[in-house]
Image (cartoon, helix red, strand yellow):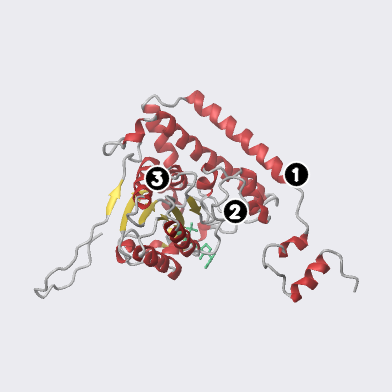
Amino acid sequence: MASKKMADGGLPVIARFEVRHRNYLAPDGSISRPLPAFASDATLLVALYRAMVLMRIFDRKAVALQRTGRLGTYAVSLGQEAVSVGTASAMRAEDVLLPSYRDNGALIWRGVGLEEILLFWGGDERGNHFSGPLQDFPFCVPVGSQAPHAAGAAYAFKLRRKPRVAVCMFGDGATSKGDVYEAMNFAGVHKLPVVFVATNNQWAISVPLRLQTAAETLAQKAIAAGFIGEQVDGNDVVAMRAAAEEAIAAARDGQGPRFIEAVTYRLGDHTTADDAARYRPAEDVQAHWKEEPIARLRTFLVGQKMWSKAEEEQLATECHERIEAAVERYLTTEPRRPETMFDHLYGKLPKAYVAQRRELAGEDDV
Ligand SMILES: Cc1ncc(C[n+]2csc(CCOP(=O)(O)OP(=O)(O)O)c2C)c(N)n1
Ligand SMILES: [Mg+2]
């Protein structure tokens, strides 16, 4: 994309900014530049691969449950698996994740149970009470509202001198929200240990990126807030892991926030309540399938003799078994009583709700 130019009138340049792009694995699985050190760890690369495959199979099952009336609206991350898995894999257990509704791959990597994810999308708030990372934030359905929370958590870490980092994930659409700008600005001013990861999947429901922003990159939005923004190939899990690792280490080291724009593509519908065929041509989606992250890593791993067909088959079986067991636990979870919807809203329930709660609980004798 060409830079926008204005007549310089002989005026001196007082500042110049750069945005870098990071990629190691090309779409065909070949190497585009020397790999980071961790990429020689076959166990790690295979773990990243396994996590992405699990995510994809889990998504398929969740959609099937929704279609058969056993789950509420669900947001798949088809095509974006490398963003959430790569990012989460660079975090320490004591760091804090502030996910959007499409970051299940990160939640699973951090230890959230598959049945908890199903519970949440089945409309049961207990799904948000993760048995895994207890201080991670819940699914954030309001677009961008997790960003000020991330700045707040990072501010607390700084005040308490804790070497912890808040990792905040949101979409390209969220980058147009005031919440996100305000959080980034505050984080920049106070040099907070927070990493913002914007998953640029090209769409905010039916709004394409070109109607979202006139900026050449989303990464450059960090520059206005006074910190580094980097653009990363979000379909390359090695690049995602490397970028997140570097950004998280810098934040932990007191160097302040970082911003990662993960460029990927939403291959699925926005949610199960959407039909993307109504606003984007099938050929575009088809073209992006050539860049998706799982086949890319598989080709690389097979080429390096780190992965085989037999292991692939074994993995599929393991994923199905693990998912079926979680679905079973989800479907056999005793539903909460309806009046419990009031239980965590207020410290002291307002009068109007006391009556409603009683009525739902069947305690109303009127
Ligand atoms: C504050 C707010 N406004 C509007 C919505 C409705 N909404 C849900 S998802 C979405 C698009 C978000 O797009 P993006 O940030 O790119 O994330 P993606 O869904 O692509 O992962 C909108 C407008 C919402 N959930 N919250
Ligand atoms: Mg988007």
Q: Is residue 37 visible?
A: yes
Left or right of 110: which side holds 44? Answer: left
Q: Position of residue 249 (x, y in %)?
A: 36, 47
Which mark is drawn over residue 66? none
Q: Residue flagged by tag 1: what amino acid is it?
A: Thr
Image quadrant of ligand 2 equals bottom left
Mark 3 highlights which residue? 235
Look at the numbered discs 2 and 3 and tell me whether their residues touch, using CB distance below 8 Å. no
User: In the structure shown, which secondary structural element does the residue marked by tag 2 occupy?
Assistant: loop
Quadrant of the rendering where the N terminus is positioned: bottom left
Mark 2 highlights which residue? 74
Quadrant of the rendering where the C terminus is positioned: bottom right
Q: CA distance from mark 2 to mark 3?
A: 22 Å
User: In the structure shown, which secondary structural element does the residue marked by tag 1 occupy?
Assistant: loop
User: In the structure shown, which secondary structural element does the residue marked by tag 3 occupy?
Assistant: loop
Position of 327 relative to 179 (above/below): above
- Characterize the local packing of mark 2: few (<14), some (14-19) or many (20 or more) Cα atoms within 10 angstroms: many
